[in-house]
Amino acid sequence: MAFQSEEIFARLNEALDAFAPAERQDLVKQVNGVFEFHIRKEEAPTSEVKIWHAEVKHVGIIKTGPAPSNPDITLFLTDADMVALAVGDLSGARAFITDRIGLKGPMMMAMKLDVIFRTLGMGPAKGSESDLGYDGFESSFLILQIYEYLQVLSEAERKAEVAKVKGIFLFNVKNTKGDTAVWMMDMKNGIGMMKKGKIDGLKPDITLEMKDKDFVDLFMGKTNGQKAFMTGKIKVKGAIMLALKLDTMMKDTQEKIGFFGEKKAKL
């Protein structure tokens, strides 16, 4: 029996071929990475494995076999999960959190899988509940990861997180073009929630304004949260102590979802 993923990669290539040169370069600029996929036909460790690679860093092309140079990220998953990702039954963020995809490389690059699928007419539908992204914002991938992490927690675990934080956060994030992305996170009521834009009827306890890059650096641990607040990289209005709780919450999230280092799939 052939790999179902063969049809998926063929369809992705057809979509790429139909792109105008400018459209293809827009995708390359947005993704800027080389992916290598190790697809196992079935979950059994002895099952056949087939390799594809997607070069979305210079030209934009998908081929059978290993990447000709070191990939930016290598993904390990089953044939069935590759199909689920492509048709939108499984988001990349949820697949990583639940260990359905193993990876070697930066999680930020892995999170761009949904971008590739959506741009090429596949993957999760835009406008779905989990679509918190803004075009041109790297921090969209972080917000989605936090959202998906909350979704896989039990109701009791989510209530415990809310009890620990007790705050409503409003994020105003600017990118290099001067565009602004807005997210609101309610970690004060019920089991918590996150929304693109503002949540009707809720007033933030704290508003944080920052550049897209600074938000990414904060989550990735490249910038110390307290130092970012003190130096003005992150402007805070409201309860300053909640800003420190946010820093702690992001570190906890990083550790629990395995944001750094390698992740092994449960195959």
Image (spheres, helix red, strand yellow):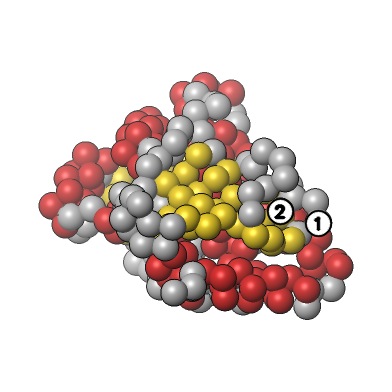
Residue at 44% in and 74% down: 1
Q: Is residue 224 above or below residue 90?
A: above
Q: Which of the 4 quarters of the picture holds residue 47?
A: bottom left
Give residue 221's position: percent from left, percent from top. 49, 28
Q: Kindly identify which numbered label has been placed on residue 59.
A: 1
Give residue 187's position: percent from left, percent from top. 29, 50
Dot 2: element: strand
Mark 1 → mark 2, Cα distance in angstroms = 7 Å
Please report contact status of discs 1 and 2: CB closer than 8 Å, yes or no.
yes
Q: Kindly identify which numbered label has been placed on residue 213.
A: none
Q: Is residue 193 above or below residue 223?
A: below
Q: Kindly identify which numbered label has been placed on residue 55.
A: 2
Classify 10 Å Cα crowding around label 2: few (below 14), some (14-19), many (20 and above). Answer: many
Residue at 57% in and 34% down: 217
Q: Which of the 4 quarters of the picture holds residue 14?
A: bottom right
Whether residue 166 can be seen here: yes
Give residue 214's position: percent from left, percent from top. 60, 36
Give residue 168's position: percent from left, percent from top. 34, 50
Dot 1: element: loop
Residue at 30% in and 45% down: 167
Residue at 42% in and 47% down: 102
Q: Is residue 258 above or below residue 44?
A: above
Whether residue 181 can be seen here: no
Tell me which amino acid carries mark 2. Glu
- Which residue is outermost to the right? 21
Between 96 and 3, the residue placed more toward the observer is: 3
Between 81 and 215, the residue placed more toward the observer is: 81
